[in-house]
Image: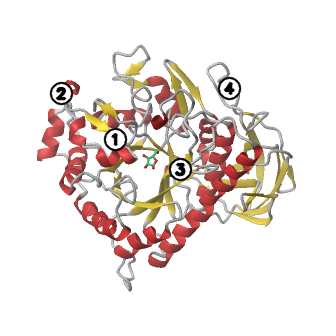
Amino acid sequence: MKAVVNVDVGGPAISRHLYGHFAEHLGRCIYDGFYVGDDSPVPNVDGIRTDIVAALRELEIPNLRWPGGCFADEYHWRDGIGPKESRPSMVNTHWGNVVENNHFGTHEFMQLCEMLGAEPYISGNVGSGTVQEMSEWVEYLTRSGDSPMSRLRRENGRDDPWKVRFWGIGNETWGCGGNMRAEYFADLARQYATYCKNHDDNTLYRVASGARDDDYSWTEALMKSISCLGCAQGPRDIYQALSFHYYTVAPTWENKGRATSFSDDEYELTMAKAWRMDEIIAGHSRVMDCYDPQARIGLVCDEWGTWWKAEDGTNPAFLYQQNALRDALVASLHFDIFHKHARRLTMANIAQTVNVLQAMVLTDGAQMILTPTYHVFEMNKAHQDATNLPLHVVQPGQRRTADGREFETVSASASIKDGQILVSATNLALEGDARIDLDLRGTTWTLGEGRILTAPSVQAHNTADDPTAVAPKKFDGADRDGNTLVIEVPAHSFVTVQLSVD
Ligand code: AHR
């Protein structure tokens, strides 16, 4: 691949919230994941596992979405406050029909966010809740002074209100969140958003539950419902963003492949499907541009990642899967795509952080394993809040075809922050180095540290016995030719190269 990068021009900021996370009451994400209870032998603070917190702090995770997912639309927040022994239990109908004891509730989640240094992103219940219930949850969390909900919060031990910016209005309301039609939900979203108030100086960023994959008609229905055509100021300020979900699944939803044993064909199909994220964001953005050319309404991808068959011997409803180098390359490709769309895309949340789907960490008792995907988040963290440097591709890399879809085997992105440029590059090919030539115009620079994430095979993964089978190493395959950065990226590898602007 040959590309020109105009360092002195730059593009939009890459919101740090594109590196967001998601934790649902599902399988072992919360219980026996983040939260082990304060009587656990696993080191914890008030039941929250300290090794997980330390690992995620390294990633500088910007936000955490909770309590779901599908679970959000059957969650009633009042069941999760007050003394634990008197909290009512409920059945988690979506994820294994297990009984949820509500021991991890609002206060525990907010404490977790404080420990992580991450902003909370709360998903409110539209599917089985009420406008009043959601409105009071906002008041409970964010209002100071003497009000019914702030008094209740104080009775439960918390004087000061919390700051909560991100607020989801429902989840997958076209499916598990109520099986609604777009036009019906479009009105509900306006109604719920209206009663999610800004208390004191807390300003909500309300995210209306959006489309599945490439259902652009859903996005259109939502955009239409908040637009007043002819208004110079753009869409009405009822909610500030809408979401969509897209998972990488291969071969099919009905017949998902395995996380660590898959064929070369399945690998290539996975990459072809991962690339679809680019076309899907572009599709939603095109619809939004028609109603909101100034991009006042954000697009949020609050669930993305790989979804494989659950590991043998685990509850299939708990969605526990291993995580191989393949997953890491899916993640690095997604970040290049997210950076490219940073003008419209304001947030993205990988599903899910611990022990579920494409996780950062997997736990087994007291043991914690960092996955290959974790390392991509860590290697890319300097892109958070940096200025995107768009790549103008003058000669694309190799192309492959899988299941009738053509896809590039080379992907890259770059950003600049505080005089430091970070270049990320992925070679998806199973064989053969990829040469990337980046003609960096408008500045002179000095070559800095290079790092590589790779392994002998794309099936490689980390286990308790071999926790660093896939871990970053020093990379010396970057060089300069005049002002052109030349990177030789080995087969199935992700590399980052740092440059300092002179
Ligand atoms: O992340 C797992 C599930 O996938 C979520 O609960 C739901 O929103 C989506 O279908």
Residue at mark 3 to residue at mark 4: CA–CA distance: 25 Å
- Residue 211: x and y in percent read 45, 62
User: What residue type is disc 2 on?
Assistant: Ser
Q: Counting other residues with Cα less than 10 Å from the Cα at mark 2, is it few (<14), some (14-19), or many (20 or more)?
A: few
Mark 1 or mark 2: whose residue is earlier in sequence: 2
- Residue 225: x and y in percent read 35, 74
Q: Which mark is residue 86?
A: 2
User: What residue type is disc 4 on?
Assistant: Thr
Residue at (25%, 36%) from the top-left corner?
80
Mark 2 or mark 4: whose residue is earlier in sequence: 2
Which label sits in the foreground, 1 or 2? Answer: 1
Q: Quadrant of residue 196?
A: bottom left
Q: Counting other residues with Cα less than 10 Å from the Cα at mark 3, is it few (<14), some (14-19), or many (20 or more)?
A: many
Q: Is mark 4 within 8 Å of ligand 1?
A: no
Q: Which mark is residue 468?
A: 4
Query: Secondary structure under badge 3?
Result: strand
Q: Which mark is residue 93?
A: 1
